[in-house]
Amino acid sequence: MPHRLLGNNQAWARATKARDPGFFTRLAQQQTPRYMWIGCADSRVPANEIVGLDPGEVFVHRNVANVVVHSDLNALSTVQFAVEHLKVEHIFVVGHYGCAGVRAAMRGLRVGLADNWLRHVHDVRLRHRKRLDHLPPEQQEDILCEMNVIEQVGNVALSTVIQDAWARGQPVAVHGWVYGLRDGLLKDLQVTMDRTETVVETFSAAIKRYRRVATATGTEALTLPDDDD
Ligand code: CO
């Protein structure tokens, strides 16, 4: 007896073909997605379904906590392929509330190998601790989910791939969204970057929407100090 998933697949392929007889022939020839999605690996955040797109319409890269690191050749190669070969016009960095990776980084929990990966999210937390530490714990996690997206949008925008694309006049915009597991809705964090000149300004404006309060206690985590502390 075939595995249940293989049975599901056969039913899906039949139904798709019945709805649109040319679907697979068309897709087999080439993909021409206009969008790229960089999201969390979390099983509750399936890229295509959330935005109502079919196979072939969105080029996807997912990892734990939707992080884009300047030395991650996996993510950067995917972005380069999307921009230079597929000519996507919009890249969405999509975080989600209730992200276990962000929670671990926020609470300093040890989860395993991923601790080293989540250190990048932890760094985001430390960088903006004056905007986070004064909030109640549940809110801190939600806000860190948002701030992590804002930081990653900046990382994508400052990558060599996007900098080169903008330098040659190729239109590609990088957006930051966050997804709500409770209501299924996406929120635009208004951090869209579409040219080099406005990256810093857009980033600062997005971060400054979160109130900065100097707290007496500060963070308890072991960290290297900012140079203005
Ligand atoms: Co997540």
Image: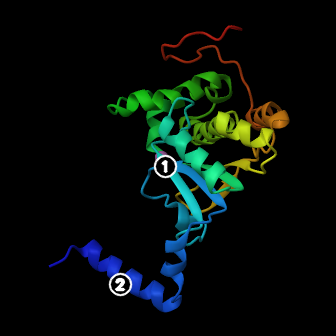
Question: Where residue 177 sits in the image (x, y, percent)?
Answer: 65, 51
Which sits in the foreground, 163 or 228?
Answer: 163
Which sits in the foreground, 134 or 199?
Answer: 199
Instruction: Say what secondary structure mark 1 lies in.
Output: strand
Badge 1 amino acid: Arg
Badge 2 amino acid: Ala
Left or right: residue 65 versus residue 173 is left
Mark 1 CB near ligand 1 (8 Å cut): no
Q: What residue sits right under mark 2 in the picture? A: 11
Question: Where residue 157 sits in the image (x, y, percent)?
Answer: 70, 38
Q: Quadrant of the C terminus?
A: top right
Disc on the earlier residue, 1 or 2: 2
Q: Crowding at label 2, few (<14), some or many (≥20) Cα neighbours within 10 Å? A: few
Please say if 176 is above or below 8: above
Q: What residue sits right under mark 1 in the picture? A: 62
Question: Where residue 163 sits in the image (x, y, percent)?
Answer: 73, 36
Quadrant in which residue 210 is drawn: top right
For the point 59% across and 71% down, the residue is 52
Left or right: residue 178 versus residue 222 is right
Q: CA distance from mark 1 to mark 2?
A: 27 Å
For the point 79% across and 45% down, the residue is 194
For the point 72% across and 38% down, the residue is 164
Residue 42, numbered circle: none
Question: Where residue 9 sits in the image (x, y, percent)?
Answer: 34, 77
Residues marked 1 and 2 touching at CB (< 8 Å): no
